[in-house]
Image (cartoon, grey):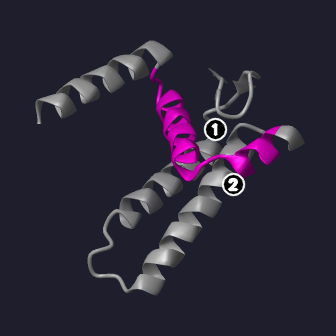
Amino acid sequence: MKIKVSQLSNRVHEVKTSNRNMEKMYDLQLMMAKADDIADMEPVEIIKVQRDMLHDSIDFLTTVLNLNKQEIEKLGDLEFAETIQAVNYTFERMMGMSDEDIDLAAKKQDASKSKD
């Protein structure tokens, strides 16, 4: 499948939903879910979990998108929130969502947030 992560470049990346890539995706999703559950963690544990999530997010994007040297440099300079956006976008595309599906889901989420 073709994925263009605008935060990194204008290049369209050919991403295979191979077992290896899907496993990387699920591992990172699991880590992200666990990182949300920090209520009973000590501060040092929280920092380690967040650091590991950052490293794994960078590794995931680098590997799955097969980033070149220039894109890896750009990834290193991204804000953390932009990195997570790129990761989530890549997840959604790998799970079969089109750009139109992603835009529609974002609009629905924005609409429900504005009602709260």
Q: CA distance from mark 2 to mark 1?
A: 16 Å
| Position above or below: 51 against 65 | below
The residue at 54%/62% (across/down) is 53
Q: Is residue 60 left or right of residue 98?
A: right
SS at circle 1: loop
Picture coordinates of residue 77, whole percent (x, y): 72, 49
Q: 64 above or below 98?
A: below
**Quadrant location, the C terminus:** top left
Helix, strand or loop for disc 2: helix
Q: Residue at x 49, y 39 (%)?
A: 88
Is residue 63 a member of the stretch shown in magenta?
Answer: no
Q: Residue furthest left?
A: 116
Q: Which residue is mark 2?
A: 59
Q: Which residues are magenta?
A: 71-97
The residue nearer to you, when weighing 66 against 68, is 68
Q: Is residue 96 visible?
A: yes
**Residue type highlighted by circle 1:** Ser
Horizontal side of residue 32 vs 15, given as left or right: left
Residue receiving disc 1: 18
Mark 2 or mark 1: whose residue is earlier in sequence: 1
